[in-house]
Amino acid sequence: MSDSETSPPMPPAGGHARLLPPDAGRDRPLFAVAAILVFLACLAALGARGAWTSSDRWMNDLAGSLTVQVRPVDGRNADEDASEAARLIAALPDIESAEARSRAESEALLEPWFGAGGLPADLPVPLLVDVELSNPDILPVEDIEAVLAEAGIDATVDDHGRWSDAVARASHLARMLALGLLTLILGAAAAVIAFAARASLAARRDVADALHIVGATDAYIAGLFERRFFGLGLKAGATGAGFAALIAILVAVGGGNADAMYFLPELVFAPVEIASLLAAPLVAGAIAALSARLAVSEELRKRW
Amino acid sequence: MTETGVNPFPQSESEVIVRFDAVGMRYGRGPEILKDVSFELPRGSFTFLTGPSGAGKTSLLRLIYMAHKASRGVVQHFGHDTAALRRKDLPDLRRRIGVVFQEFRMLDHLSVFENVALPLRVAGQKRSAYAEDVAELVSWVGLEHHMESRPATLSGGEQQRVAIARAVVNQPELLIADEPTGNVDPDMARRLLRLFVELNRLGTTVLIATHDLTLVRALDAPVMSLADGRLTFRERAA
């Protein structure tokens, strides 16, 4: 188009500039909120995972064992009865091991209720035999009762069914609570991002209008906001997950502090948990991007 | 000069770029801004749109560049009834229309070069494919030394030329300019008008909205006049 015979004008070097102008610090509060939500979500996820692992462990422990109570009988030595019971039980099929607990160990179990030395020496205290099963699916309760009755030992067998049901219900509740909390936090994060994306679009209406006029599609404009909020979600996710990892490490290192454990979810720091924390920024970015895209697309559809 | 209430642009063998038939327009539930507006813009025509402030010129232009829907009547762009178009079809039609706004509507965080290249970038073209053409166009409007300047650092006339370059960079079939000389001195106004005439000579249909009668009288072009939302026609300005 130029009629100049001199050298043609040179385009400036460099690549594309961003079509959305820099946020100039406007996104900082959103970044903080998103990072806090990701931090809480990570803690909830770790807590959920901890509840899952713990309940599995409890259920496995309960399912793979039996407890035999050997009651003292006049004229017989209770300790000897317990040892004999353990020996007889260990000889049965499907039994991994059987170990008799002494009277001192039984008293120790009762100590929280009666205090140290609170039991008279002549009080008949049932003695316990811990039985580990080689196959948790087979409960040889009748075999044990039969062999002990034959030996004249007064004993009852507890297959933990009463406890395992309660533990199953409690662990299921704990899992559901943790997952519910995680879902709520992620939902809150998505809602906050959607709100921020709408505000961002309103603040950049001039850009959106200019792009529309030159023929940009809704998807193109929404994509600009999607990429911006993906980046924000990614950074906020990394920050939040980093702090959550720090907390998990501190809890794992100081896990012996029983008082703290009453107030903190059981945090486990294993490969699955590490992978979850590493994935958190990507998940946060994806949620932010999707929320922004949906919100901006909905706003754009209101225009013509 | 003849003034009538009928469309002086008869349907000819040439393709009609824009056709309005008994069009009314209102914002929300407000009063009707445009009333029974009917006209056609044939391909290759050069037309002025005049009228006092508040007459509805900008609203009419918004209908033409598809920033708003008509409340009633028929609006056709390039033979398509826009009311029947799906939303996803609009960007393709908008790319066939270049718009020069009175307030320029530049993206201030982008350079002159990037602003001019915006329609091509939005259309998905690679920078390497258009960089030289855009640079040549920027040079054509006399801003070769401001290629990397931000629009806010330019004078009104310079910004107007950036806006014109952006509007024509993808060789639109229809060029709309809203008060293009409103922010420039008379000498610059004449130069801009020559620019529009040159674009029209190259085949672009041009519609200029202005209340600058000096500009209108400078050309032997049809004039559409808006008053109180109604359109009247004069076949020639002088």
Image (cartoon, coloured by chain):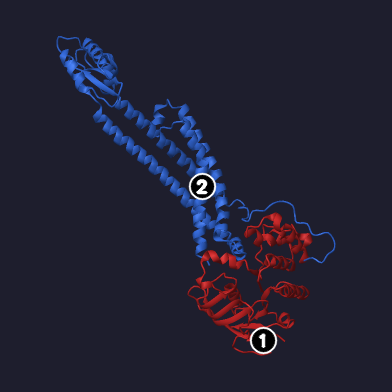
Chain colours: A blue, B red
Name the residue beneath numbered marker 1. Answer: B235
Up/down of A274 relative to B211, above or below: above
> In the rendered view, does B112 fall on the left or right side of A150?
right
Q: How crowded is mark 2: few (under 14 residues within 10 Å), some or many (20 or more)?
A: many
Give the numbered dot on residue A286: 2
What element does badge 1 sit on?
A: loop
Q: How crowded is mark 1: few (under 14 residues within 10 Å), some or many (20 or more)?
A: some
Up/down of A292 relative to A68, above or below: below
Give the numbered dot on residue A210: none
Q: Which residue is depicted at the point 29% across and 23% down?
A: A65
Residue farthest to the front, as pictured:
B13
Q: Which residue is depicted at the point 55% across and 52% down?
A: A226
Amino acid type at mark 1 = Glu
Mark 1 against mark 2, which lies toward the viewer?
1
Query: Where residue B8 appears, x then y in whole percent?
Result: 63, 86
Query: Where residue A11 appears, x then y in whole percent?
Result: 75, 56
Nearest the camera: A127 or B39? B39
Mark 1 touching mark 2, by CB under 8 A?
A: no
Q: Can residue A192 be seen at all in this image of the molecule?
A: yes
Amino acid type at mark 2 = Ala
The numbered mark 1 sits on a residue in which chain?
A: B
Alpha carbon separation for disc pair 1 and 2: 59 Å
